Image (cartoon, rainbow, N blue to C red):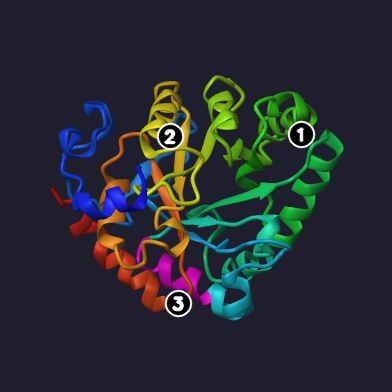
Amino acid sequence: MRRRDFLGLGLYGGAAATGLPGWAVAQPTKRYASDVVTLGNTGIKLSRLAVGTGTNGVGKSSNQTRKLGLDGLADLFWYGYDRGLRFWDSADQYGSHPHLKKALTKVPRDKVVILTKTHATTAQELRADVDRFRQEIGADYLDIVLLHAMTRRNWPELRKGAMEALAEARQKGIVRAHGCSFHSLEALKTGAATPWLQVALIRLNPVEAHMDADPQTVINVAAEMKAARKGVIGMKILAQGDLRNRVDEALAFALRQHCLDCFTIGVESRDELADLIRRIPEASLRV
């Protein structure tokens, strides 16, 4: 589905309106950003909305870290926490670990779920990253660690060492769950068929912007993951800002998908976060 198709569709009222199979679209039920959901079969409970830190995240920097700085981003975490958002999305690539550490000075570690991402390929690199991440964040354990930005169909072969080290870290209680973020359809399909994968971070929005395939195709693969009881987290929900003028429709689309347990959105101010929190309940009821 292209942008022009979405603009003509308006609201996503159900399978007939969206062209999606019936199992992919939930009936309207009021949902909130602060709803507590369980991530696949990991046993991890987190809020429906994650505070994201990686808009244009590259080279250990992002919009959030550049614009808000250490204190500003920590304040955004605190603002969300006070409103029930207990899920923080970070990555080594975003440079946001110190900001999480600052936020943890006012938030109990066991009251928030922290996700981070690594580019490690070998077991040695992965173990070093996990140790460094814990030090940078100031935490004894990490809730979710993802292999970042999988694009190759054979990523399990290319990342075998890192995968084995993550499984070892989970057995030791250093990491609670592991998985991947995906940046290609072929890599995503491999993820659906890989038992090691517990959590998938996938790109999904209604206009096929910054995605790996059209929404129908991505939802089909995500549904396979969901059927295998993997946790599925959505990203690019607002199409990296392309849908800033169609926020309600984009949120409604994400909230109606059975294949998503939750989703992450990067905001750059208290006002933006407050606006999302306000919009989500009404967006969830759009028909």
* Marks 3,2: beta carbons within 8 A: no
**Could you tell me which residue is drawn at 50 percent across and 51 percent down?**
210
Tell me if residue 12 comes above or below residue 266 in the rendering: above
What amino acid type should be assigned to the residue bearing mark 1?
Answer: Ala
Q: Is 78 colored magenta in this rendering?
A: yes
Mark 3–mark 2 Cα distance, whole angstroms, equals: 30 Å
Q: Nearer the viewer, mark 2 or mark 1?
A: 2
Nearer to the camera, 46 or 181 = 181
The local crowd at label 3, few if under 14, some if 14 to 19, many if 20 or more residues have their Cα within 10 Å, is some
The residue indicated by pointer 2 is 218
Q: Element under label 2?
A: helix
Q: Residue furthest left?
A: 287
Q: Is 216 colored magenta in this rendering?
A: no
**Could you tell me which residue is drawn at 43 percent across and 31 percent down?**
222
**Quarter of the view holding residue 181:** top right
The residue indicated by pointer 3 is 269
Q: Element under label 3?
A: loop
